[in-house]
Amino acid sequence: MPLFNVTLVHRIFRGIWVTIVTLGAILLFYYGFRIIYPFLIAWLLAYMMNPLVRFLEQRWRFPRWTAVASSILLFGSIITFAIFVFTTKIVSESWHIVGLVQEQIAEWRNWLNDYYHSAEFQAILSDLNETLTAIDLQSSLSKYTSTIATTGSALVAYLFNFIKASVLFLPKLAVITVIIMVATYLISKQWNSLATASKQMVPERVRASLSVVSGDLQHAIFGYVKGHIILSSITALVFFLGLLVLGVEYAFTIAIIGGIVDLIPLIGIPAIVVPWAVFSFIEGNLFLGTGLLVLWPIILVTRHAFEPKVYGSSIGLNPLMLLIFLFAGLHLFGVIGIFVGIIALVVLTALQRAHVFRDVWRYIMTGSFFPMAPPAPK
């Protein structure tokens, strides 16, 4: 009788090998992402341009390189124009908003100081001093107002430093953009040959699983991103119209910021509307505060009304699992972990649909990714 089970030992070693390969792939992607991300973006752009390139090739008889160059020029012009318009508008109005915030902080500080020296507050202070003579309310109030002013100034300084850092990043961004554009041209120009070469390198049975995984990933990721952008755009539009009705200055920039915040799952537009409404009530602007509180449910109802139609069942993510992965990603990686959680769930769901986990388990148990052929009849 053998001292150990050879089959079991082989299974253990295959399991260890699968674990090492999986962890190695994750670490390689994690540390290599900052190097390869321009080429991933280039592949994505080439994939998006491919229908237009094929149209120019087949309908207008363009050579491949001319069709690719024309598509890049068209895409680049549209994106550049959109970025220029939005950036110019947002930056110009952001400076005005920063000035308004500083003025608002100064007004709140002056209001607190005036209220402290008012007869009404002095009467309250006199009554309190009879029982709490040891409390220096003036010092506490002065410290409180100084804290508010310091916090507000710090926020303004942070915004200024962010804008300054963004401007200093522009030269590096220009170099990265050139690399992405050149890589996009080369990938798109050689798209057919690259696709043929990849098919020849991968066995047919593996290619079938990869095709399912790739199709599910594209369907789920693009479906989620597209749906999220559409819903955030609807949110920004309703927010913008509501701010116009309320007569708010710089409604466009505030609505754009609201739309960007709404892109972050689990946060959304209440992060802006609710604090703004509270400060409006404190300031005595009942019209604006009430209007914002009325606008908030209107935005939520509009978003939820469009949500089933936009998302539908095309993404195919379990709502409970999505919530679990969102929370796990947020807990492990912060705000960026929300997106990591979504992508991780999409990848795992696609792998499960392609039966990759089943095939890996079969490899661990039998040494083959594919079912064993039945024995030939004697």
Image (tube, rainbow, N blue to C red):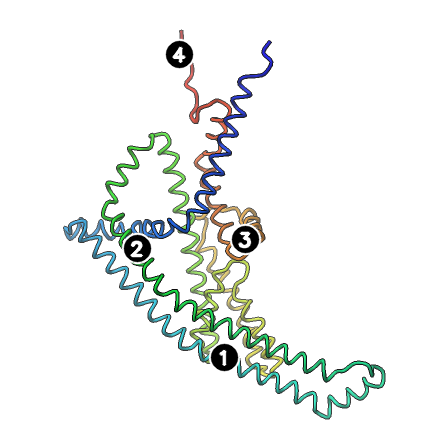
- Of circles 1 and 3, which is in front? 3
- Spot occupied by residue 23 in the image (x, y as percentages of width and height): 49, 38
Name which of mark 2 and mark 1 comes first in the sequence: 2
Split into 4 quadrants, where in the image is the N terminus?
Answer: top right
| Residue topped by disc 2 | 179
- Spot occupied by residue 307 in the image (x, y as percentages of width and height): 47, 57
Which of the pair 269/84 is nearer the observer? 84
- Spot occupied by residue 309 in the image (x, y as percentages of width and height): 44, 56
Which element is circle 3 on?
Answer: helix
Determine the CA span between mark 2 and mark 3.
29 Å
Split into 4 quadrants, where in the image is the C terminus?
Answer: top left
Determine the CA span between mark 2 and mark 1.
46 Å
Q: Is residue 284 above or below residue 166?
A: below
- The crowding category of the residue bearing disc 2, from other C-alpha atoms within 10 Å (few below 14, some 14 to 19, many at least 20), is some
| Residue topped by disc 4 | 376
Q: At 54% from the left edge and 70% from the top edge, which residue is drawn?
A: 272
Q: At 85% from the left edge and 86% from the top edge, which residue is drawn?
A: 130
Determine the CA span between mark 1 and mark 3.
38 Å
Q: Is residue 121 above or below residue 172?
A: below
Name which of mark 2 and mark 3 comes first in the sequence: 2
Determine the CA span between mark 4 and mark 2.
56 Å
Identify the amino acid type marked 2.
Answer: Ile
Q: Is residue 186 above or below residue 266?
A: above
- The crowding category of the residue bearing disc 4, from other C-alpha atoms within 10 Å (few below 14, some 14 to 19, many at least 20), is few
Q: Are marks 3 and 4 in contact (CB under 8 Å)?
A: no
Q: Label for residue 246?
A: 1
Q: Is residue 253 above or below residue 33?
A: below
Determine the CA span between mark 4 and mark 1.
80 Å
Left or right placement of residue 357 versus residue 40 in this view? right
Which of the pair 272/184 is nearer the observer? 184
Determine the CA span between mark 3 and mark 4.
54 Å
Identify the amino acid type marked 4.
Answer: Ala
